[in-house]
Amino acid sequence: MARAGLTADRLTQAAADLADEVGFENVTVSALARHFGVKDASLYSHIRNAQDLRVRLAVLALAELADQVAESIAGRAGKDALVAFASAYRRYARERPGRYAAMQIALDPDTAADSALKHAEMTRAVLRGYELWEPELTDAARLLHSTLHGFVSLERSGAFHSHPRGVEASWLRALDALDSVLRAWPA
Amino acid sequence: MARAGLTADRLTQAAADLADEVGFENVTVSALARHFGVKDASLYSHIRNAQDLRVRLAVLALAELADQVAESIAGRAGKDALVAFASAYRRYARERPGRYAAMQIALDPDTAADSALKHAEMTRAVLRGYELWEPELTDAARLLHSTLHGFVSLERSGAFHSHPRGVEASWLRALDALDSVLRAWPA
DNA sequence: AGGCTTACCTAGAGGTCCTAGGCAAATTAT
DNA sequence: ATAATTTGCCTAGGACCTCTAGGTAAGCCT
């Protein structure tokens, strides 16, 4: 019988696509096996268990997002860079909802190290335009990350739908607010 | 045979405690039935299905948080109120991690209406000290909510642990930043 | 061609979700 | 107080998911 040619990477990629289609919580080993036309048990040669699959998916998403953000902020500085950063982040969450959800699982520091480093570097690149230094730089990076993640995840969960005010307008205002608070930070 | 005296409310309460102990994602109908010493099937007289249980848990958590926040901000105004609001929010996420996680599931507007209204009222109460009016009031409320939720959920997922800078210091700085941006908002 | 590695298989145990149908306990009506 | 009704909890069982053990055969290397 012909082999399907599975590898951990192909499984992770397919799992990511599946997550975007049916939701991260519905990514199961069984569903993934069905997608490749093989039996569940066959996947366990490539992944340790279901949690391992989820972690690989999260790492994939973190790396992808880092790439897209890096591309967005390249050649920009100051508020331009901030807006590019934020927009790339939000766009990823929109276009890849399953991958974005995967990113939210808690990863042990070792597993997340590579991605965490890249994300930290990019955040610092954006903040370079605001002339901040440690330890305030870290405080500002955490605030930036918090605001973006908070806004995007509340938007996705529908928390903003209860009010007619357009979400887009609030988003632009939030970016304005972030920009002005970063410029005034040295206080 | 003596009955266990189950009701939807008792199940939801127990599910909330279970969530705080073992994590929201590990709250199962089976585990809950075990806790009461009954069979799984018995719970389906009180809850429609597993998702219904999760929704009830989310609504319970939203109401509890609203109560605690209301108590915290009572009699305070301006930055005092802001800090009280934020601290109550963060404390709840810390002390009731399972309930906090439950709150994040997407609820249909009807189900969330009561809690959403109360939360909206309180947010507006805090912002009253900053003299904001619609539509900026909504923008500011969304930013406030985003920042708090973002910070708290990133803190919980361990995203801040990769850096030695104390999280507490960053938290205080974030509150300062929020306060100053709200004061300067009318721009 | 023979040997080795490994991709995928079957079989099966154990867990969760949920429905259908039944009995007995609690409640209400007489 | 007994009868009628409601309902809380039961058993049985199907569908799906996770994961292990052990086997067969496909593809690579010599």
Image: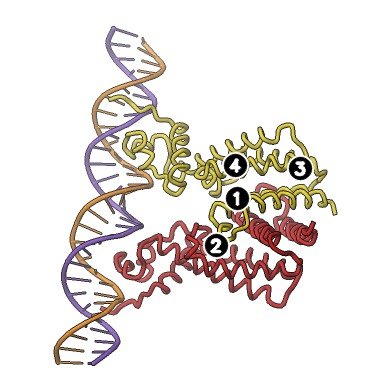
Chain colours: A red, B yellow, C orange, D purple
The amino acid type of the residue labelled 2 equals Tyr
Answer yes or no: are tags 3 and 2 on the same subunit.
no
User: Real-space Cα distance between discs 3 and 1?
Assistant: 19 Å
User: Real-space Cα distance between discs 3 and 2?
Assistant: 34 Å
The crowding category of the residue bearing disc 4, from other C-alpha atoms within 10 Å (few below 14, some 14 to 19, many at least 20), is some
Outermost residue, right side: B187
User: Real-space Cα distance between discs 1 and 4?
Assistant: 9 Å
Residue B79 marker: 3
User: Where's residue A180, x and y in %?
Assistant: 79, 59
Helix, strand or loop at label 1? It is helix
- Residue B55 position (above or below residue A31): above
* Chain at tag 4: B
What residue did someone put label 2 on?
A100
Among the two numbered marks 1 and 4 on one chain, the one whose residue lies closer to the N terminus: 4
User: Real-space Cα distance between discs 2 and 1?
Assistant: 18 Å
Answer yes or no: are tags 2 and 4 on the same subunit.
no
Q: Is residue A121 left or right of residue B33?
A: right
What residue did someone put label 4 on?
B91
Quadrant that contains the C terminus of chain B: bottom right
The residue under the point 48% across, 39% down is B16
Answer yes or no: are tags 1 and 4 on the same subunit.
yes
Nearer to us: label 2 or label 1: 1
The amino acid type of the residue labelled 4 equals Arg
The crowding category of the residue bearing disc 1, from other C-alpha atoms within 10 Å (few below 14, some 14 to 19, many at least 20), is many
The amino acid type of the residue labelled 3 equals Lys
Depth order, front residue of C25/A130: A130
Helix, strand or loop at label 2? It is helix
**In the rendered image, is residue B135 in sight?**
no
